[in-house]
């Protein structure tokens, strides 16, 4: 059986994935509208946004980023050799080790939630003496100083519930890697729709029955569990399984890990930038964190529908092209660049022009003021300025990983983070939250 994809197949599968992603994004907009009504208070919105940011970023880094980039090319090569049994053994070993490490990491973060929040949101710990690290000033919160504000207690409660979310989604990602190695993309693309349906259902029930705010976190966990069960069902349906590990399995796993760690830093550049933005935003007025998160969600509509859909389809395809016809790589890259350009540039212009109307129409209420609408508009425009570059970044990263080149993305990521930190210092006092978004775009 051939698993190669032609140009028409790539477009067709990209449309399938894109439609699922688009449906998920629109459900995501509805869920954000309901979230504002359910949580309402700026303090609760900031606390929930910060608590959800950690498992959500770990999901993007592990479940959708570095793990997939390192995992899928190896699975494609194994499938080409007809080593289905070795794929099953590799899946067993990967589950045992990767999920074991993540469970240990989750337990550590559960235990040290206070310190984690001090690192992510130092502005939430007020007072205390100035601290220094090797002579350089650092936030007092990082030295264990300062008194926590009201957001900290809520964020800690939400975080301790949500941290298990990454376990379900990283497990789903491992299964999705096997599915994508045989060009089965629709279930991995549809699973976020399922999560959003559960999320929206939880919000509607919460609003109707006046449930406590932490009930939303339990619905999100349940959605993650359903995603995992859906992937597991299709995994078995496609005749994959789990088998006993052999010595050769360890060789394949070491190969994946040798790719994974360089990929980890490069794939996490945007998430690291958002964490840096969160640290700076914690010093801004209440609600700033949620506005950055909300604008980034709208930014994710064109980015997710086109860039993420293409990169999802093209990673296994690039891996095959690199094996069979490496000279064709430049052709596919040119075609993708043209397509992404003609899609993202009009989307950027239209969304920038209607940014204010979008937030005013969807969110303006007694719990979301006209001032918040104006600030959210500026933040979204700042994010949209880099839409084409952000869209191409993920595709280029996957191309490099298909070529087994991890050094260039890693160095570019280091430069990007350094630029982001410097620009945050320059922009935050003058442009506030929109300055943080602009710094991320430039970096």
Image (cartoon, rainbow, N blue to C red):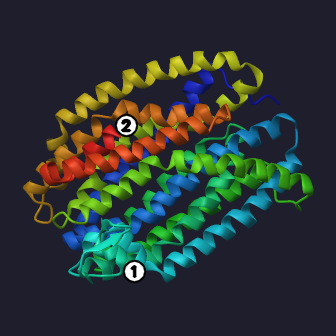
- For the question of whether residue 425 can be seen, the reply is yes
Q: Is residue 252 left or right of residue 287?
A: right
Q: Which residue is mark 1?
A: 114
Residue 425 higher or lower than 443, as above or below: below
Q: Position of residue 41 (x, y in %)?
A: 19, 72
The local crowd at label 1, few if under 14, some if 14 to 19, many if 20 or more residues have their Cα within 10 Å, is: some
Q: Position of residue 218 (x, y in %)?
A: 45, 75
**Closest to the observer: 409 or 292?**
409
Question: Which of labels 2 and 1 is toward the front?
Answer: 1
Q: Point out the residue furthest to the left here.
A: 370
Q: Is residue 241 left or right of residue 58?
A: right
Q: Which residue is mark 2?
A: 302
Secondary structure under the numbered disc 1 in the rendered image: helix
Q: Point out the residue furthest to the right here.
A: 247
Which residue: 65% across, 29% down?
Answer: 318
Which residue: 41% across, 77% down?
Answer: 115
Q: Is residue 284 left or right of residue 148?
A: left
């Amino acid at each position: 059986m051939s698993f190669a994809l032609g140009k028409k197949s790539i477009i067709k599968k990209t449309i399938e994935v894109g439609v699922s992603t688009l449906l998920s994004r629109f459900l995501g907009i509805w869920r954000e509208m309901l979230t504002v009504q359910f949580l309402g208070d700026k303090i609760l919105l900031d606390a929930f946004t910060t608590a959800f940011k950690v498992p959500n970023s770990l999901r993007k880094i592990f479940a959708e980023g570095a793990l997939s980039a390192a995992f899928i090319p190896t699975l494609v090569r194994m499938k080409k050799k007809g080593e289905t049994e070795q794929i099953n053994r590799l899946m067993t070993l990967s589950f045992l080790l990767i999920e074991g490490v993540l469970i240990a990491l989750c337990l550590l973060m559960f235990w040290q939630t206070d310190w984690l929040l001090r690192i992510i949101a130092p502005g939430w710990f007020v007072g205390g003496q100035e601290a220094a690290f090797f002579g350089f000033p650092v936030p007092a919160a990082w030295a264990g100083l300062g008194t926590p504000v009201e957001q900290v207690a809520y964020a800690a409660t939400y975080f301790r519930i949500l941290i298990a979310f990454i376990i379900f989604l990283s497990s789903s990602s491992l299964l999705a890697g096997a599915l994508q190695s045989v060009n089965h993309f629709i279930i991995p693309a549809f699973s976020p729709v399922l999560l959003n349906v559960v999320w929206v259902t939880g919000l509607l029930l919460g609003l109707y029955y006046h449930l406590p705010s932490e009930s939303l976190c339990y619905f999100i966990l349940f959605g993650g569990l359903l995603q995992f069960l859906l992937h597991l069902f299709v995994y078995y349906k496609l005749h994959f399984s789990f088998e006993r590990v052999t010595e050769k399995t360890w060789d394949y796993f070491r190969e994946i890990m040798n790719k994974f760690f360089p990929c980890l830093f490069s794939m996490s550049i945007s998430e690291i930038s958002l964490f840096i933005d969160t640290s700076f935003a914690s010093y801004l007025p209440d609600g700033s964190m949620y506005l950055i998160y909300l604008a980034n969600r709208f930014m994710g509509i064109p980015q997710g529908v086109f860039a993420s859909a293409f990169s999802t389809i093209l990673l296994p395809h690039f891996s095959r092209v690199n094996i069979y016809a490496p000279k064709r790589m430049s052709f596919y890259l040119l075609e993708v660049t043209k397509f992404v350009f003609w899609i993202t540039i009009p989307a950027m212009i239209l969304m920038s022009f209607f940014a204010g109307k979008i937030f005013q129409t969807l969110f303006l209420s007694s719990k979301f003021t006209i001032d918040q609408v104006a600030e959210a508009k500026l933040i979204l425009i700042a994010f949209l300025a880099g839409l084409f570059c952000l869209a191409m970044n993920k595709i280029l990263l996957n191309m490099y990983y298909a070529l087994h080149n991890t050094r260039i993305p890693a160095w570019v990521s280091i430069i990007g983070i350094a630029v982001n930190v410097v620009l945050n210092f320059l922009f935050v006092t003058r442009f506030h939250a929109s300055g943080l978004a602009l710094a991320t775009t430039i970096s």
